[in-house]
Structures are given as C-alpha cells and as structure tokens.
Image (spheres, rainbow, N blue to C red):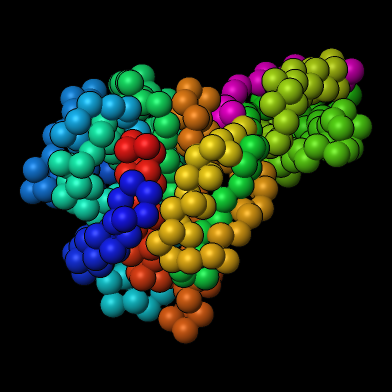
Amino acid sequence: MDGTYSVDKVTERAKRIHKKQIAWRRHLHQYPETANDEFQTTKFLRGEIKKLGLKVLPLKMKTGLLVELKGAKPGKTVAIRTDIDALPILEQSSVPFKSRRKGFMHACGHDMHMATVLGLASVLKQFKDELQGNVRFIFQPAEEHPPGGATPMIANGALKNVSMIFGLHVDPHLATGKIGVRGGITMASVIDFDLIIHGRGGHAARPQNAVDAIVIAAEVVESLQKIVSRETDPISPTAVTFGKIEGGTARNIIADTVVLTGTARTLSALDSRRLPKLIKRIADNICKAHGARAEMKIIARYPVLHNSSKTNRIFERNFRRLFGGGKVSETEQTLGGEDFACYLQKVPGAMVRLGVMNKSIGADKSWHSPHFIADEQALFFGTSLLTASVLDYLNS
Ligand code: NI
C-alpha cells in the first residue's frame, strides 16, 4: 500500500477494463452526435451504466446523464465530468472505426473522455467497499456549442453536495503516458456576441440618401481591434475576432443592415466584465457618428477557467505514485474556452490534460482536425489516474 490504495490493484483493474474501453470508444467514435443532439450517445451511456449496476440520477434535460456511486462508508462527494458531443466535421482519418455519420466526427476526443469515465465508473465500483464517500459522474452535452451544457447540468443538481470536481481533456501535443496540469487561470473567458449595424438602404450611386451599413461595419471591425491594443493591459492577453460578416444583397444596392458575428476572449476576470461594455461603447459611438444604430446581442458567456492547485497536486502526486516521476508537464495557457469553467466557479477542481500523442499511429494532429486520431493506450493512463485521485481525495 502506498497512501490510501494499492497501486497494483488500481493498475490491474484499469488494465482489465481496457479492452472494453476500446470497444466503447470505437462505438462512440462511429456514431458521433453534435451538441444537444446526443440522443443515441445518451442511450448508449445509460445502457452501459445500467449494466455496470450504477444509479442514474433524475435529470430534466434532453441529453446527458448524471450517475452516482455511493461508497460503503460516508464521506465527501467528488464529481468527474466528461463531455459527450462531437463536431460537424467530415472525418478524413483512415481508422477502421471511422465515423459512420457523414459530416460528423469526434474530432476533439470526447469519445475518449466518455470511454475513460465509463471505465472509471467500472473500476471504482470494484473499490466500493473501501470508498469513503460518493462519486458523481457527469456526462455533459454540448461542450462545443455555447452557451454549453454545463450551466443546465449545474441547474439540475450536478454539483449537489460536491466538494471537488475533476475534468479531463485529451491532448494530441502531449505523448501518451504523460499528463499536463496548470494552476490558476488556464483558459479564457469567452464572450460570443453579434453586432447588428442598422443603416438605411439605398441606390449605390446615391450614397447621400442612404446610411451605408457596410462602410460603418468596416470601421466598427477595425476600431474594435483597438480594444486589444489600447483598452486592456498589454500584459493580459485579449482577442477580439469576427469570424463572419453578413450584409447586403447586390452590387448596386447600399446595404441596410450588417451582422457581425464575433467572439472576445480574455484571461482576466476583470476584462471579462469590461469587454461587453467596451464593445458596445465603441460600436454605439461609431454608428452614432454616421447616423446608424448598433445593436448588441450576447450569445454566450463563459468565465475564465480557474484550476485549483490543490486538485493539481492530487493529480501530480497520484500519477507519480502510479507511473513514476518526470511525466507531468505544465499545460500552456490558451485563449480557448471551455464550459468546465462554469463548474469551477462553484466548486474547486481542475482539468487535467491526458497525453494521446503517438506519431507512429498518426496521433499527432490537432483538435478539430478532420485527421484527428487519439492513442487508445491513453485510456489506461486516464482511468488509472482518475481512480487513484478519487481514492486519494475521498479516503484521506
Ligand atoms: Ni473538447
């Protein structure tokens, strides 16, 4: 025994479930479903959870699943979250278990997350008699599609009595057998918004009788870049990006309306509150100057993702116990967003990066690539780590 569990028992049990996990993962990979449409995925998960003899908690959502494992002894409750949705991407990898739903793909590894957590549930159930407390498994829909599934999950009691939450994400830039952690702010606050520029349409040759929404929109897009260079602290990373502009109907008609589809990102909680006001102020005033009107719609907001160092120490300590030293690296900060941040606003916890890179099988393409491949050996490392971390947290 080392600490609160036997290392051999954890790795043996994780090894024993590995084949089954590969089968689960390959099934899920072949039938990907996008955000809020994960009906077959939910049905599959529910079926497997019932086969494992675990309790499904009531949930008033179309998709997703809440599961609880009660330990033999009373104690704390720890939650594990996996996302369950896929992406609208046409798979171009050549794995034999390629997506059978054309145009949809698990290109972010959420199939790996689900298989890891199903395996974890199976292994932890075998530790039920020594478990001092409870484990909540959160199978969350719609991670990829803001406003995301985390907020409704929380509203449905996913965090009830929970004192710590673990999350995991595969990392195709980190070798299999390694993990990444980072304390503090690791991922960005996201503000997804639409700006609608209301002008007045007219004839292309008579601009004096119209208010050209396209010319004004161009000025708005350009000026909003000055938020990054002039309105926020240069030491604090910020991005304002418009991924889509829609406006106008024909060459000889001045556009009445333009819709700018944008996203603003920051690693500062303070700037996260300031950004919507800044965007609105600049857009309003440019529009006013030219006789137009700006309308702003916030589509979704995620807070910054703040990992607890206490949770990271649990991951680090247990990964070292299981697999030796030198296998934990520091995750880089990114302006990417993750609705796991919503759980971390309520309870301490952290998201661990699970290495799935293995160049010999082509598993080194980035997330969301149509060629994305994950090394299934990582299922073993993820399951062992999370099993050990749960036992360590609950039993000590
Ligand atoms: Ni993802």
**Residue lying farthest to the front in this orientation:** 1
Q: Is residue 343 magenta?
A: no
Q: Is residue 79 visible?
A: no
| Range drawn in magenta | 289-303
Main secondary-structure element of the magenta-colored stretch: strand
x, y percent for residue 346: 48, 22
**Within the image, what quadrant is residue 26 found in?**
bottom left
**Within the image, what quadrant is residue 262 found in?**
top right
x, y percent for residue 396: 37, 37
The front one of 83 and 19 is: 19
The front one of 293 and 123 is: 123
What residue is shown at x 50% (from left), y 40% (from top)?
A: 311
x, y percent for residue 279: 76, 24
Q: Is residue 140 above or below residue 101?
A: above
Image quarter in which the N terminus is found: bottom left
Q: Is residue 111 above or below residue 81?
A: below
Instruction: Locate residue 63 relative to residue 328 in the image: left or right.
Output: left
What residue is shown at x 15% (from left), y 41% (from top)?
A: 129
What residue is shown at x 80% (from left), y 37% (from top)?
A: 236
Q: Is residue 278 above or below residue 386?
A: above
**Residue lying farthest to the bottom in this orientation:** 360
